């Protein structure tokens, strides 16, 4: 049976590994540069808001395990905050061990401290990847899920410098793009003003550094909204964000906190001296990034050209998921693209026809729409997500957004895709 090698252990990489393993009993190896899985998922926490509910249920109807695992470590469900409904907030401390357990259940090999620094090729095919430890890992097909944030030089070039975020480039080394190593010309996302990159959209505060009243409300309701005095508001706080679904006036006028175990602060950064002038935040301290008073990580600086099967154009045996697959923002978006990439990687290794998800499904429509939009300069200025902004509006216009789970299952069934990611392409390991 073929060997699938996944580079990057974030949401996209873990989803790709599970999908590939479920499609075949072949060997799946996951290489992660850091000492934990999930990458920015370690400080994320938001699921099922707005159209992400639809996308999650579509993928579940197609046989995915990831969202079910996330639901088991949720701190709050059916939460509302400005512009967002039926939100699930997962526990950032419990989610990574839960995903490790899922990978172990499927007998997926995952290696930590395994940053891929180079590749070997045979024509237009990748033969192997080489890690910092000089281990050479051969594969029949590869999935790149390395993300688009880092290295430090990118944060200095396009942002406010290294903010010491969860990506931890100084400790584990800079992100290396596999597609770029293979000679592929990648794209860079832009802000509305044409400048390059986009800044991560949230920070995390130590709960213990907040007032007792804020912590109590946060733990009970999952969300706290505190008005910002006019003199402390940041005029640029919305335009710099990668997460345009949160670029609403309410997020500029208020401190909005979500309970993910940390107190998730819904702004790219907030000067600490100003934050501490807001009642209840007098002793506030950042948990992530440590320099959240001055900046955050820069993203979308290495987007791979790909088709709607998520195969990287120009390389015969490389697929991509997560932010590598385009300007799709968020964990749900990483999971759905990673799943398709991993599944199709296995299909190609077996010589089977690759799967294109139809545009009658929100996931298929999003993958096709973003791929098309990224061919223009203006399209590269937009960030796409199931949960808001341009793409959520498109979902609603096309009648793709719904919270009716039975209707979603019927939609998937009509497309002939019920359980497609749970069925072996030839034969598969079964994990219950």
Image (cartoon, rainbow, N blue to C red):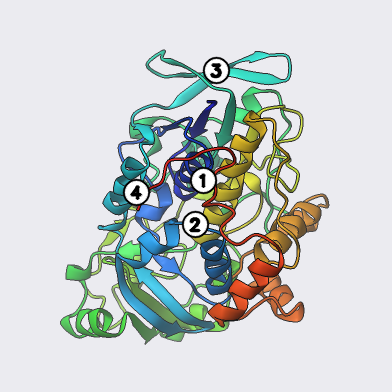
Which residue occupies the foreground of this view, 383 or 355?
355
Asked whether 421 or 207 is in front, the reply is 421
Give the mark nearest the N terminus, 1 or 3. 1
Q: Can residue 271 be seen by looking at this rendering?
A: no
Tell me if mark 4 has few (under 14), some (14-19) or many (20+) residues whose alpha carbon lies within 10 angstroms of its own.
some
Count of numbered labels shown in the rendering: 4
Nearer to us of marks 2 and 3 is 2
Residue 131 locus on image (x, y percent):
44, 20
What residue did someone put label 2 on? 64
Mark 3 Cα shell of 10 Å, populated few (<14), some (14-19), many (≥20): many
Residue 168 in the image, given as x and y percentages of width and height: 36, 40
Q: Residue at x 50, y 72 (%)?
A: 234
User: Disc 4, disc 1: CB below 8 Å?
Assistant: no
Residue that mark 3 sits on: 128
Write the residue at 76% across / 44% down: 307
Going from the N terminus, do you reach mark 1 or mark 2 first?
1
Q: Position of residue 94 (x, y in %)?
A: 26, 58
The residue that label 4 is drawn on is 102
247 or 45, nearer to the observer: 45
| Position of 117 relative to 100 (above/below) | above
**SS for dot 1:** helix
């Amino acid at each position: 049976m073929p060997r699938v090698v996944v580079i990057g252990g974030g949401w996209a990489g873990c989803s790709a590994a599970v999908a590939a393993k479920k499609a075949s009993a072949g060997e799946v190896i996951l290489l992660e540069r850091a000492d934990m899985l999930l990458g920015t998922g370690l400080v994320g926490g938001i699921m099922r808001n707005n159209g992400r509910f639809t996308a999650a249920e579509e993928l579940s109807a197609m046989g995915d395990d990831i969202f079910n695992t996330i639901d088991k470590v949720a701190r709050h469900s059916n939460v509302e905050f400005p512009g967002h409904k039926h939100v699930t907030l997962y526990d950032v401390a419990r989610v990574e061990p839960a995903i490790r357990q899922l990978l172990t259940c499927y007998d997926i090999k995952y290696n930590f401290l395994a940053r891929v620094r180079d590749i070997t090729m045979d024509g237009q095919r990748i033969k192997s990847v080489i890690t910092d430890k000089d281990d050479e890992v051969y594969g029949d097909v590869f999935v790149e899920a390395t993300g688009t944030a880092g290295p430090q030089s990118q944060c200095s070039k396009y942002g406010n410098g290294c903010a010491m975020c969860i990506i931890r480039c100084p400790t584990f080394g800079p992100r290396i793009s596999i597609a770029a190593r293979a000679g592929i010309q990648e794209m860079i996302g832009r802000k509305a003003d044409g400048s390059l990159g986009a800044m991560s959209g949230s920070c995390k505060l130590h709960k213990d550094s907040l007032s007792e009243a804020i912590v109590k409300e946060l733990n009970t309701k999952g969300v706290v909204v505190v008005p910002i005095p006019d003199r402390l508001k940041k005029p640029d706080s919305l335009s710099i964000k990668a997460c345009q679904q949160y670029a609403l006036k309410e997020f500029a006028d208020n401190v909005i906190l979500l309970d993910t175990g940390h107190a998730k602060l819904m702004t790219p950064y907030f000067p600490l001296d100003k934050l501490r002038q807001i009642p209840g935040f007098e002793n506030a301290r950042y948990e992530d990034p440590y320099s959240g008073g001055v900046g955050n990580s820069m993203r979308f600086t290495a987007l791979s050209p790909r088709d709607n099967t998520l195969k990287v154009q120009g390389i015969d045996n490389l697929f991509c998921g997560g932010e590598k697959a385009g300007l799709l923002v968020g964990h749900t978006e990483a999971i759905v693209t990673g799943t398709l990439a991993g599944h199709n990687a296995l299909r190609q290794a077996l010589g089977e026809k690759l799967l294109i998800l139809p545009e009658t499904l929100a996931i298929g429509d999003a993958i096709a729409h973003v791929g098309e939009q990224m061919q223009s300069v203006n399209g590269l200025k937009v960030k796409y997500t199931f949960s808001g902004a341009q793409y959520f509006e498109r979902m609603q216009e096309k009648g793709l957004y719904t919270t009716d789970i039975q209707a979603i299952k019927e939609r998937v069934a009509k497309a002939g895709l019920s359980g497609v990611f749970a069925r072996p392409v030839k034969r598969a390991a079964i994990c219950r």
